[in-house]
Amino acid sequence: MDDEFLRLWPQAASDHAHAIDWLIWSFTGMMAIFVVPVFVLTILFAIRYRKGTRVSRDHRPRGSMKVEMTWIVLPFIGSMIIYLVSARLYYEVKTPPADAMVIQVVAKQWMWKFQHPGGQREINTLHVPVGRPVRLNMISQDVIHSLYFPALRIKQDLLPGRYTALWFSATETGRYEAFCAEYCGTDHSKMLATLIVQSPQEYQRWLSQSGASESLAEQGEVLFRQFGCSGCHGPAAVAKAPTLEGLYGRRVALHDGTSVIADQAYIRDSILLPHKQLVAGYEPIMPSFSNVIDEEGVLRLTAYIQSLGEGEQGEPHADSPRNPPPEETAP
């Protein structure tokens, strides 16, 4: 008989999955220690003190401080251990390593779209190398979806209009299933994906054979010129628009006196909702591209802008009031 048919627990393909299993079984065992005696004593008392038995039914209160303190202290210590371990696991799953490989994910009724940094694109299949941290930068194009990898014990919602992230490091090669864990419409049950974990050599071979001729940033540069963005934001532009070199990751001063870090969410809003966070010193003349470009295009444009240089967080951008653009020349 197939081993998969007899399996009562999903296969563990990451260190995080093993830690989650340990946490679940430890919590279950702790609950059994405190719940099973209650059920056993309930049954024994029901038999011993049933109607007609000759036993003492003296209801005068009797107790033991040692028993009561033990019953209080031990569950408290156990619950604190479970809390600390779960808090550590939550922090780890929400804090991807700085050197994690970033893969862009767009969810759409009813499919998963993955795009690698080198420009390789996949639908409902994700190739990753074993032993390397992978961060999924995710967004939904329509409704709320939820990407769930049972073998990795991780799950994260994908929201329209907002980026979310998920990271993992697979420790076992093989093919693993992924599901949409949030009801998203008629074909929700068919919104499946396959995670293929390969050795580093096999993964590099797959990348070379996938047929991508341009990286994600290079594809973004094509869109940048196709939509005429270079006419305002390019080095030789005559229009007065913020420069993009060194923008990503820097602090930008806004028209209302506040400031914001130019991260991926800020760039997305600047493309689709350009008047939402207007840069100080500039007029609201940029048109919205919300009905022109899709989420995949926004990701490519963001990758291109990021490739123009990243600044340190907290440093003002060249167009901030600390370094205002000259009036006689275009920024």
Image (cartoon, rainbow, N blue to C red):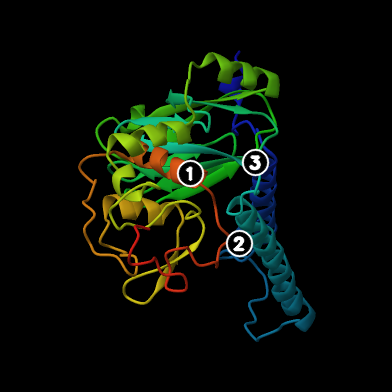
- Residue 249 position in % (x across, y down): 51, 57
Q: At 32% from the left edge and 69% from the top edge, which residue is drawn?
A: 281
Q: Residues within 10 Å of mark 1 (few under 14, many from 20)?
A: many
Q: Residues within 10 Å of mark 3 (few under 14, many from 20)?
A: many
- Residue 222 position in % (x across, y down): 37, 32
**Residues under labels 1 and 3: Cα distance?**
20 Å
145 or 136: nearer the eye?
Answer: 136
Select label 1 or label 3 by which is in front. 1
- Residue 83 position in % (x across, y down): 65, 63
Which SS class for mark 2?
helix
**Residues under labels 3 and 2: Cα distance?**
37 Å
To which quarter of the image does residue 122 belong?
Answer: top left
Q: Amino acid at mark 1?
A: Asn
Q: In the rendered view, would you say 230 is above or below 6?
A: below
Q: Amino acid at mark 3?
A: Ala
Select label 3 or label 2 by which is in front. 3
To which quarter of the image does residue 327 belong?
Answer: bottom left
- Residue 165 position in % (x across, y down): 50, 48
237 or 313: nearer the eye?
Answer: 237
The reply to whether residue 161 is in sight is: no
Select label 2 or label 1 by which is in front. 1
**Which residue is the site of mark 3?**
17
138 or 70: nearer the eye?
Answer: 138
Of the numbered discs 3 and 2, the one sitting upstream in the chain is 3
- Viewport quadrant of the C terminus: bottom left
**Which residue is the site of mark 1?**
137
**Which residue is the site of mark 2?**
42
Which SS class for mark 1?
strand
**Residues under labels 2 and 1: Cα distance?**
52 Å
As drawn, is 282 to the left or to the right of 235?
left
Of the numbered discs 1 and 3, the one sitting upstream in the chain is 3
